[in-house]
Image: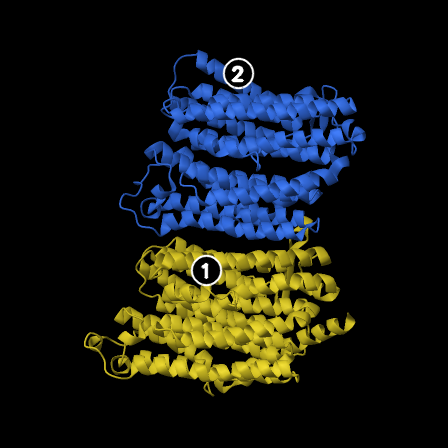
Amino acid sequence: MMINNFFILLRQELILSVLIFLLLFIKLGKDRSNENILNIINVALFINLAAGFCCMHEGSLFSGMFTTNALVAFQKNILNLAIWIISMQSFAWLKTHKHVIEFYILLLTSLLGMYFMISSGNLLMFYLGLEMSTIPLAAAANFDLTKKKSSEAAMKLIISSAFASGILLLGISFLYGTSGTLSFEILPAHLGNNPLQIFAFILFMSGFAFKISAVPFHLWTADVYEGAPVAVTSFLSVISKAAVLFAFGTVLYKVFEPIANTWYAVLVVLSFATILIGNLFAIRQENFKRFLAFSSIAQVGFILIGLSGSSQAGLASLVYFILIYVFSNLAAFGVVSLVSALTGKENIADFKGFYKTNPTLSWVLTIALFSLAGVPPTAGFFGKLFLLMAGAAKDNYWLITFAALNMVISFYYYLRIVKSIFMEPNEQPIQKLAIPVVSKFAMYLCVAGIIITGLASVVYDYIYSLSFGL
Amino acid sequence: MNLSLLILLPLITALAILFSKGLKQIRAIGLAGSVAQLGLAGWILKLYMNERSNGNTTAYLFESNYSWFKALHINYHIGIDGISLAMILLTSFIVVAGILVSWTMEQLSKEYFFLLVLLSIGAYGFFISLDLFTLFFFLEIAVIPKFLLIGIWGSGKKENSAMKLALMLMAGSALVVVGLLGVFYNTGTFDIVEITQLGISVAAQQLFFPFAFLGFGVFAALFPFHTWVPDGHASAPTAASMFLAGISMKLGGYGCLRIALLMPNGAQEYAWIIILLATIAIIYGAFATMMQTDLKYINAYSSISHCGFVILGIGMLNKTSINGAVIQMVSHGLMTALFFAAIGMIYSRTHTRLVAQLGGLLKVMPFISTVFVIAGLCSLGLPGLSGFVAEMTVFMGAWQNPDVWHRLATIISAASIVVTAVYILRATGKTLMGPISNEHAVLTDATWNEKLAAGLLIIGILIIGIAPFLINQLIMPSTDILMAQFEKAITLK
C-alpha cells in the first residue's frame, strides 16, 4: 500500500528524535541516579523497538529523497533490537559513568543517521545519513575517559572514516557528472559500461568497503575496536556494519543493477580477500576485542558471498544473517563487556578456567561462539549455509569451496576460546561475577534468539517474503 | 509410526538431565531414556518387519514430510529403510552400553551425560533423514559434543586430539556442503527420494561426487583422512570412544553409501579410487596396529582397517558387497564399542593402557578378560561372531566383480586378516596371560553395570554371528530396491 503520510512513514525517525530530545530534557532537569536514567532509557528503547513493528507501509517522501517499505522498516527494527540489547548489556559499565546521557545522545543520533541512510532514495541523502551516523561514533569511541587508547581509537576512527567518506563522495560526484542525477529512480537508466562510471563505482565501492571493514580497507578496525569501550565496539561491529550492509544491498540491487557483472566480480574479489585475511589474523589475536574485530571481518566476507548471489534469496539471506549476527555477536560482546566492566580483563587468556567460576556466562559465550562459527543447532549454521546457498546460485563453486574450507579455519579460532573456557586450568580464574538483572535478561534474550531464529523457519520465510530480487 | 519420536525421546532425556541434580539422578534419567529408546527402536523394528512381510515394497517406510524452509525448498523429510533401521538399532545398543559404563562419572556429570545424549540425537536424526539438508544438520550436531567430551573428560594430550578431530570433521563437512549445494542447484531439491527420481546430470555427478563422498569419507576414516581417528579415540573417555567408533564413524559410512547410491554414475566412475583408498586403509591400518603399544591405539588403528571394509564394500557396488558393508558397519560398531568398553574397564583399574605394563589379568578379572577375548576374536573374524559374517559378505560381494583389478583388491584386503590375527592374539596374550604384577593382583572384576553393558553388546555380536539371516532379512529387501534404482539410473544415462 502506497501512502504519503509524513507521520506514518517517518514514524521510526520521529520516535527516535523525540527520544533524543527527551534525553536532553532529562539532562537539564534535576540530578537523577544513573540507574534510574538507564532504566528509563531501556524501557524507552524497548518501546521504540515495539513501535517499529506497526504500520510497515511502503511509500516515499520529499520527492523521493526518503523511501521506505516493509523490508526497510524491518531492517531498522533489527538495528533497534541491537541497540536495546547493547544498552542493557552496558548497564554495569554505565552505572558508574559520569556522562550517561551524552553517551546515549551520541549513539541515538548515529542511529538516526543510519535510518536516513537505509531509507535514502538519493545519493545525497545517502551521504548525509552516512556522515550523520559516523561522526557521533567517533566521539562515543572516546568515552572511556581515563584511557588513552580510547581517544586514540576515536582519532583513528574519525580520520579513517573521513578518508573513506572522501573517496565515496568522489565516486558520487563522478556518477553525477556522467549521469546528471543522484536519484535512485533515475540513475540506473543512465548507467552503462562507461569507464568513468565504472571508475566511479569502484570509488563508491571502496568507500563502502571501508565502512564494513572489508579487506583491503580493514586496517582501522582492530585498533578502533580494541581502544573503544566495549559498548561502542559492539555498536560499531554490529549496528554500524549492519546498517551499511543494508544500504549496500539496496544500492547494489536497485541502483547498480545495470552493471551487475562488474560489481559481481568486485564482490568476489573482496569476499575472497576479506574471508582469508580476517581468518588468518583472527587466529593470532590475544585481546578478545581485537579477536572479535577480525572474526567480524571474516563474517563480512561471508555476507558478501551471499550478496553476490544477486537474487531474492541473496538479499533475504543477508538480512537474515545480520539478524543472527546481532544475536550471536552481541551475546559474545555481552559477556566480554561484563567481564571487562567488572574485572578490567579483556584478554583471551584471562578466560582460562572460566567455566569453573562462571558456568552460565561460559555457556552463553560458548553458544555465541558456536553460532558465529556456524555450528548447528544454533542459528549461525543456517545463516552461513543460506549465504553460501545464495552465492552458489552463480555456479561459482571454487568460491563456495574456498568459503566452506575457511569455515574450518574460523572453527579453529572459535574453538580455541571454547578450549580455554572449558579445558585449560588457570591459577587465578576470573572470580564469580555478580551479573546485573538487565544484563542477564539481555544475554538470555540473545541465546533465545540464537536458538529460535535458526530452528523456527518462520523468521527466514518472513524476511524472504519482504525481500526483492535483482 | 512417527519417527520424530526417535529424536524427541533423547531430546526430552537431555532436557531432563539439565534439570536434575546429583550423579544418581542424572545417570538414572540417562539410563531410563536410553533404555526407552532401545525399546522404541525394537518396536519400530517389529512394525517395519510387519510392513515388509505384508509385501510393502516402497523404498522408505514411515515417511513424513514437513516443509521447513519453504522459500529454499528445504523439508524436514524423514523415513527409514532396512539400512537406516540397522544403524538406529546399533546406535541404541551403544548408547545404553555407553551410559552404563559411565555409571561412576563424578566430574561434571550433568554436562557429560547431556553431551552423550546430544551426540545420540545427532546420530538418530542423521539416520532417519531423507532430506540432504536435515541429514547435514544432524551430522554437524554430532561434532561439537565429541569435541567437548574428548577435551574435557579425556586423557593424555586431550585438547590437541579434540581440536584435531573437530577440525578434520569440520573440513569433511565443508566438502559435504559443497557437494550438497551442487546437487541442490542441479535438481532444485534436497530431497533424497525426489533426487533419485529426477536423477542428477552426469556432468554434475562427476563434479560433485568426489566432494560429497570424500567429505563423508573423512567421518568414516577413509585413507588419507584417517589421522583424527587414533588420537581422538585414544584421548576420549571410555563412553566417548565407544560412541566415536561405534556411532560416529558409522555416520560417515552411511553417508558414503547414500551418496554412492544417489550419484550412480559418479560412483561408478570413481569406484576404482574408492577401492584403492579402501584397500590402502585396510592394509595400512592393520600394519599400523602391529606397531602400537597402547590398547586404545591398537583398537583405534584396527578401526581404520575395519572401516576400510565398509568403504570397500561400497566401492564394489553390487548387492552383496553393499549388504556386507552395512553388516560390517553394525558389526564393527558393536565389536569396537565392546573393545573400548573392555579397555576402559581395564584402564580404570590398572591406570595404564600400555600392553607392556599389563599381564595376567585373566586371573583377577575373569569377566573383563572374557569380554576382551570375545571382542578380539570378533575383530579377527572368528566364525560364530559378527565380524566373520560381515567380512565374508564383503569378500563374496567383491569377488563377484570378475576383472583382475577388483580381484586383486579383494585378495589384498582379505590377506589383512592374517595381520589382524597377529596383533589381536599378541595383545590378548600379553594383556591377559603370563605373570601378573603385584599391584594388579589385588584388583577386582567388573561391577554389575559393566557386566550389563558388555553383555548387551555381546548379545548383539552373537545374534549377527550365529543367525546372520536375521540381519539379512532386515537389510536385503532395502538393498534390493536401492540397487534396482541404481542399475536403472546407470542404464538410463
Farthest right residue in view: A189
Quadrant of residue B313 within the rendered picture: bottom right
Asked whether disc 2 touches disc 1, contact meaning CB atoms under 8 Å apart, the reply is no
Q: Residue at x 58, y 74 (%)?
A: B276
Q: Do we see residue B378 in this rendering?
A: no
Compared to A359, does B179 lie above or below?
A: below
Identify the secondary structure beneath mark 1.
helix
Disc 2, SS: helix
Q: Give above or below for B473 relative to B170.
A: below
The chain ID associated with circle 1 is B
**Image coords of residue A115 (percent x, y):** 61, 26
Give the chain of mark 2: A
Distance from Cα at disc 2 to Cα at disc 1: 56 Å
Q: On the image, which quarter does residue A464 sit in?
A: top right
Q: Which residue is mark 2?
A: A21
The residue where tag 1 is placed is B165
Q: In the displayed structure, would residue B72 be above or below residue B424?
A: above
Would you call the spot at circle 1 few (<14 residues within 10 Å), some (14-19), or many (20 or more)?
A: many
- Assign the C terminus of chain B to one quadrant of the image: bottom right
Q: In the figure, the yellow chain has which letter?
A: B
x then y, percent, for residue B255: 58, 66
The amino acid type, in three-letter code, at marker 1 is Leu
Pinpoint residue B415: horizontal percent, then vertical percent: 50, 84
Q: Colour of chain A?
A: blue
Residue B320 place in picture, x, y as percent: 62, 81
Does mark 1 fall on the same chain as mark 2? no
